[in-house]
């Protein structure tokens, strides 16, 4: 196969870039993972399972997943109203890669913690640029 025939990972249409654009935000993979653990989930169950997600963000994430055909929402007309969410067949196709990513994360916790620590340090220096950076300049200044 020639170099010209190789898939171009830099192309915006490259499948990996496309799926990461769909599921690569802060909450989508977390919600997909929770939905993959049981056949049906109610909104309140998801909110309890993911305590640091706001109600607004959970609603937005669920709507996006429904729009993308990755989950199905069923509304039962009863009092009080009941809504259940479940993964579609296409949503289930993401279960294995997301589970693998979770395993990878657990196996590489030290690496991840290091990256988060560096980012936190850079972020705090950006907010306070006059704080010492820990580096000393050599030479005499006049």
Image (tube, rainbow, N blue to C red):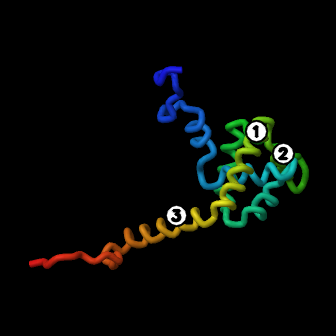
Q: Residue at x 34, y 78 (%)?
A: 131
- Tell me the mark number nearer the camera, choosing from 3 and 1: 3
Q: Which residue is mark 1?
A: 93
- Figure quadrant of residue 111: bottom right
Give the mark nearer the N terminus: 3 vs 2: 2
Crowding at dot 2, Cα within 10 Å, few <14 / some 14-19 / many 20+, comes out as: few
Q: Residue at x 47, y 65 (%)?
A: 119
Q: Is residue 101 above or below residue 140?
A: above
Q: Position of residue 137 (x, y in %)?
A: 24, 75
Query: How far apart are the alpha carbons under marks 3 and 1?
Result: 29 Å
Q: Position of residue 142 (x, y in %)?
A: 9, 78
- Tell me the mark number nearer the camera, choosing from 3 and 2: 3
Crowding at dot 3, Cα within 10 Å, few <14 / some 14-19 / many 20+, comes out as: few
Total marks shown come to: 3
- Tell me the mark number nearer the camera, choosing from 2 and 1: 1
Q: Is residue 29 above or below residue 55?
A: above
CB atoms at circles 3 and 1 under 8 Å apart?
no
Give the mark nearer the N terminus: 3 vs 1: 1
- Element type where label 1 sits in the image: loop
Quarter of the picture containing the N terminus is top right
Q: Residue at x 32, y 73 (%)?
A: 129
Q: Is residue 38 above or below residue 72?
A: below
Return the mark for residue 75. 2
Give the mark nearer the N terminus: 2 vs 1: 2
Q: Nearer the viewer, residue 94 or 113?
A: 113
Q: Residue at x 83, y 50 (%)?
A: 83
Return the mark for residue 115. 3
Q: Position of residue 31 (x, y in %)?
A: 72, 53
Query: How far apart are the alpha carbons under marks 3 and 2?
Result: 42 Å
- Element type where label 2 sits in the image: strand
């Amino acid at each position: 196969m020639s170099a010209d025939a190789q898939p171009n990972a830099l192309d915006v249409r490259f499948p990996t870039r496309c799926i990461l654009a769909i599921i690569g935000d802060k909450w989508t993979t977390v919600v997909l993972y929770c939905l993959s653990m049981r056949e049906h989930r109610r909104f309140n169950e998801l909110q309890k399972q993911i305590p640091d997600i706001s109600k607004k963000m959970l609603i937005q994430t669920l709507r996006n997943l429904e729009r993308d055909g990755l989950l199905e929402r069923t509304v039962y007309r009863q009092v009080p109203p009941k809504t259940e969410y479940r993964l579609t067949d296409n949503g289930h196709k993401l279960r294995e890669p997301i589970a693998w990513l979770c395993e990878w994360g657990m196996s590489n916790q030290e690496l991840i913690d290091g990256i988060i620590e560096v980012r936190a340090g850079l972020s705090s220096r950006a907010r306070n640029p006059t704080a010492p950076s820990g580096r000393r300049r050599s030479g005499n200044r006049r």
